Amino acid sequence: MSAAHPETTSGYIGHHLQNLQVCKVDGEWVWNHCQGNFWTLNVDSMFFSVVLGSLFLFLFWRVAQRATTGVPGRFQAMVESLVEFVDTSVKETFHGESKLLAPLGLTVFVWVFLMNMMDLIPVDWLPWTAGMIGIPYLKVVPTTDVNVTFAMSLSVFVLIIFYSIKAKGISGFTKELTLQPFNHPIAIPFNFILEGVALLAKPLSLSLRLFGNLFAGELIFILIALLGIWQLPLHFAWAVFHILIVLLQAFIFMMLTIVYLALANEEH
């Protein structure tokens, strides 16, 4: 159990589930007293998201710079296989013309995977290290922050609207929302509500699915950490199983992004 918060089980769990926050109150920036403040920035989530995104860009740029036509190294072979896998997934799902979708799918998959992988680090290591330098709270898994997952899903939502209007025009997109499934003027209000809910459910389900699965996994790791000397074997056992969840959730987020954009690009 963390040396900084050993007093109660609920205090320990609450400490590990608390983000490092900053917000503006009465014209002044304050730390960690932001309950109920809408304009709150989860600093730790933003920090690890940017660091892991930068790590992804650096590693793939380095592979591209050192790529060889001869026998590739292990990391180059892995990157080439991953790029080919994503490209094949896009071609099988998206039947239009887009230079954006394959790079987007690759970025989404690798970035979400790296953020999910932070869940495998023992829950006390980084928060304890941060506490030694005066940082009271630290959540290291960005995808356990619903603000991060919802921000990514909103980006996908904007692309859904963009591809829908690009493929069908504003009038076609409007007709899709108002004349389906019942092609009659009287049914326009009902159609709009039905199609609007279906459209808004895409980013909502995309964000909450990723958040829910990773948050549950993080909570189990925290509960395991409460077991004292028994935590190491149990942490290892759960981590081995959790690798599948980490990989699967990144794949699902990527595939749903591709599927939603493919549907937006097609005429019904």
Image: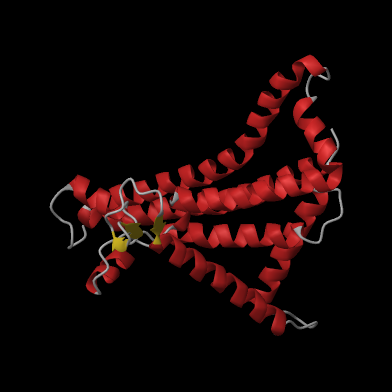
Above or below, 77 against 198 in this view is below
- Colour convention of the picture: secondary structure
Above or below, 224 against 77 in this view is above
Q: Residue at x 33, y 60 (%)?
A: 27
Given the current orientation, which residue lies at the most extreme front position? 27
Image location of residue 76, percent across then percent down: 68, 75
Q: Which residue is drawn at 29% across and 62% down?
A: 30
On the picture, is 42 further left or further right than 184? left
Q: Residue at x 23, y 73 (%)?
A: 132
Report the quarter where the N terminus lies: bottom left
Above or below, 102 against 267 in this view is below
Residue 242 visible, this angle: no
Image location of residue 249, percent across then percent down: 56, 49
Residue 143 visible, this angle: yes
Image location of residue 209, percent across then percent down: 53, 41
On the picture, is 244 further left or further right than 187? left
Given the current orientation, which residue lies at the most extreme top position? 186
Given the current orientation, which residue lies at the most extreme left position? 7
Image location of residue 54, percent across then percent down: 55, 72
On the picture, is 116 further left or further right than 32? right
Report the quarter where the C terminus lies: top right
Q: Which one is nearer the viewer's eye here, 101 or 77?
A: 101
Snapshot quadrant of residue 194 = top right
Q: Which residue is drawn at 39% across and 50% down?
A: 218
Q: How many labels does the image show?
A: 0
Q: Which one is nearer the viewer's eye here, 25 or 78?
A: 25
